[in-house]
Image: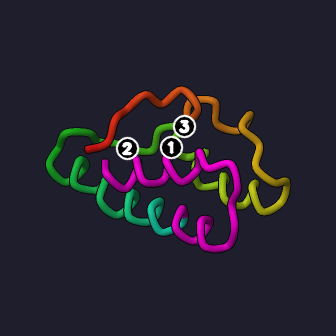
Amino acid sequence: MCAFLDFCYIARRDIHDSHSLAAMDDALQRFHQYREIFRTTGVRVDFNLPRQHSLIHYIKLIRAFGLQTVFAPQLQNLNISRQ
C-alpha cells in the first residue's frame, strides 16, 4: 500500500515535470507488483477495481492535457497521514 500512497502524494503536486511523472510511473508499477500478494494469499480474487484502473491513464493524461484535478477527485480528498 506504500507504493499506492506514493503515487497519490506525487499526483497531488501542483507542478509536474519528467522526474515527478517518472516517479509516479515507478510507484504505480510497484503498486501493481506488490498488490499481487492479496491475490496469492486469497484475500481478494480480483484486485482490478475501476478507480485503480484509471490510475493507469493518469500519467498519460497529465502529459497530454496538463495537470487536471478533475481527473481524480478521490486523490484530492485523500486524508491519510503517512508515517
Residue type for callout 2: Phe
The vertical placement of 73 against 4, above or below, is above
Q: Tell me the kind of residue under disc 3.
A: Pro
Q: Which residues are magenta?
A: 1-24
Q: Is residue 20 left or right of residue 69?
A: left
Category of crowding for the residue at label 2, using alpha-carbon neighbours closer than 10 angstroms: few (below 14), some (14–19), many (at least 20): some
Q: Is residue 71 above or below residue 39?
A: above
Q: What residue lies at 54% left-to-right and 26% top-to-bottom?
A: 77
Asked if residue 64 lies in the magenta stretch, the reply is no
Which residue corresponds to the image point at 50% horizontal and 43% vertical from the top-left? 52
* Image quadrant where one finds the C terminus: top left
The structure residue drawn at horizontal position 69% and vertical position 68%, both measured from the top left corner, is 17
Residue nearest the observer in this picture, 38 or 66: 66
- SS category of the residue bearing label 3: helix
**Label 1 close to label 3 by CB (< 8 Å):** yes
**Image location (x, y in percent) of residue 2:** 31, 52
Is 51 in front, or is 11? 11
Q: Which residue is mark 3?
A: 50
* Mark before the other along the chain sequence, 1 or 2: 2
- The residues tagged by marks 1 and 3 sit, at their Cα atoms, a distance apart of 5 Å
Mark 3, residues whose alpha carbon is within 10 Å: few (<14), some, or many (≥20)?
Answer: few
Q: Main secondary structure of the magenta part?
A: helix
Question: Are discs 1 and 2 less than 8 Å apart at CB?
Answer: yes
Name which residue lies at 34% across and 64% down: 33
Q: Which residue is mark 2?
A: 47
Rendered image quadrant of residue 48: top left
Location of residue 51 in the rendering, given as x and y in whole percent from the top left corner: 54, 37
Which type of secondary structure does the marked residue at label 1 adopt?
helix
Q: Is residue 83 left or right of residue 75?
A: left
Q: Which residue is mark 1?
A: 52
Mark 3 and mark 2: span between their CA atoms?
A: 10 Å
